[in-house]
Amino acid sequence: MRGQLALGAWMKPSVVTIEPNGHFCSDCAVRDFAVCSSLDPAELREFEHLGRRVHFAASGTAFSEEDITTSFYNVLEGVMRLYKLLPDGRRQIVGFALPGDFLGMNVSGRHNFSADAIVAVTACQFAKAAFGRFIEARPHLLRRINELAIRELSHARDHMVLLGRRSADEKIAAFLLGWRERLFSLKGSSDTVPLPMSRQDIADYLGLTIETVSRTFTKLERRGVIEIIHGGISLLDPAQVEALAAA
Amino acid sequence: MRGQLALGAWMKPSVVTIEPNGHFCSDCAVRDFAVCSSLDPAELREFEHLGRRVHFAASGTAFSEEDITTSFYNVLEGVMRLYKLLPDGRRQIVGFALPGDFLGMNVSGRHNFSADAIVAVTACQFAKAAFGRFIEARPHLLRRINELAIRELSHARDHMVLLGRRSADEKIAAFLLGWRERLFSLKGSSDTVPLPMSRQDIADYLGLTIETVSRTFTKLERRGVIEIIHGGISLLDPAQVEALAAA
DNA sequence: AAAGGCAGTTGACGCAGATCAATTTTGACC
DNA sequence: GGTCAAAATTGATCTGCGTCAACTGCCTTT
């Protein structure tokens, strides 16, 4: 039985469905690589009561930049876009969140980016206060969170290089390879790269326009390097894509 | 008496001077806002033996990307540039380090950017292994490090927006304000912003060319918004600079 | 199956910022 | 103070990508 709850009627229609129980961390899909990988079975049982499963419909918002942080999220299923907006509406996507990603950490008490679902998302939601108390006594969990933050920081720096110093072709090539690499750890190796996000999302992630993204895909397809398929891209010549990415 | 040591003869001539003793954490300039702010007086005395003071001459290299991490650094004095290079030499500066900044954290065991001194730098150097052992038993230090990493991550995301979505004028204006803001906590408020880094450094930080940086400064000066002074910029009309930064 | 709408593609054109090329300024060293 | 090299500025020109606009194809609704 599911409860229905409209979260923040003042924002985009984003219906959240909550399942209060019936789930166990021990058989969670992200058990081995999310934050919770640092917990032993006994801790896990306690942890179970801390989080509750929430669902976001496609294009539903989990939280917005500057919102006061009341919850952390552990993505279990689906894909989210994390982004910042300039006052005039220009958008920069600072990352995509996939299963296993932990969202919401900040120093100021407010979120420093917005997050919404690209496809239907399932996440584990934790009340900030309770989660904070749980960490308090468990340095290994803190160490795990720190590890995730440092890894994220490394990705952020790589992305700065892409945004500041790469051409459109290089950006597209690097994006395809990077996205394939991220999916690799979730779904295994494949030269067919599913792209659940829109062209606009890709453009806002790479610091390009939608037209340039589209043209670059078409160009690479005409050269026989990739094939544009429904809902993704197939890498016909991965070595060539790597050469284009220039690093 | 000072020891002299050539660190890594294979890299740029970077002379490191080591002072083995005669320094106390308790009267360290960055005591209150660096990682060590989380330590109590007793811990601080123990901590003292872990670090040693090192000096880098201007343009000396502390570590390079992909180097195996053997040390962490706590900047005490001076300014460093943190950057990544593409194979063909394009450079992206991912940040500037100032007193109080902690460098070297990573997950892979290798540095994910290079760091060198812009002006003469003094830093507190910690052997990775010993530092790791010290943290082990001190969750509050770990929490402090985590806090610094999360703050850094927030800056990184802001910078992604700048690199991906702002015009040259906006980049320059935002840079001047951001740099002033960072110096504010160290030296207090001032409309005179010292710029110890070169135009090339600024360009590589903002994803521009040196010519565009120079031209933009000149343009703003002609408009009476700033004044280019020796070793820095004076903000004649800070409100106008803020308007230009567009956020 | 017709209609409407949105995502994506394609084309024509313009411009912000890169590139190329001199100068000028600054600073270090004798 | 004179010499030299590196850093910064300025100008002329070029171009990659953005902007504007039209079109296509797919999905949803009725």
Image: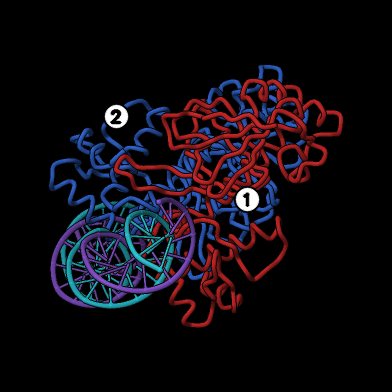
Chain colours: A red, B blue, C cyan, D purple
- Name the kind of residue labelled 1 in the image: Leu
**Is residue B117 shown above or below B19?**
below
Q: Chain of mark 2?
A: B
Q: Which residue is mark 1?
A: B5
Q: Earlier in the sequence, mark 1 or mark 2?
A: 1
- Name the kind of residue labelled 2 in the image: Ser
- From the top left corner, tell me how far across and down residue A162 is, in percent: 47, 59
Mark 1 vs mark 2: same chain? yes
Residue A247 in view of the camera: no
What residue lies at 75% left-to-right and 46% top-to-bottom? Answer: A29
What residue lies at 63% left-to-right and 52% top-to-bottom? Answer: B111
What residue lies at 23% left-to-right and 38% top-to-bottom? Answer: B243
Give the quarter of the image for residue B22: top right
Residue A198 in view of the camera: yes
Q: Secondary structure at mark 2?
A: loop
Q: Residue furthest right?
A: A42
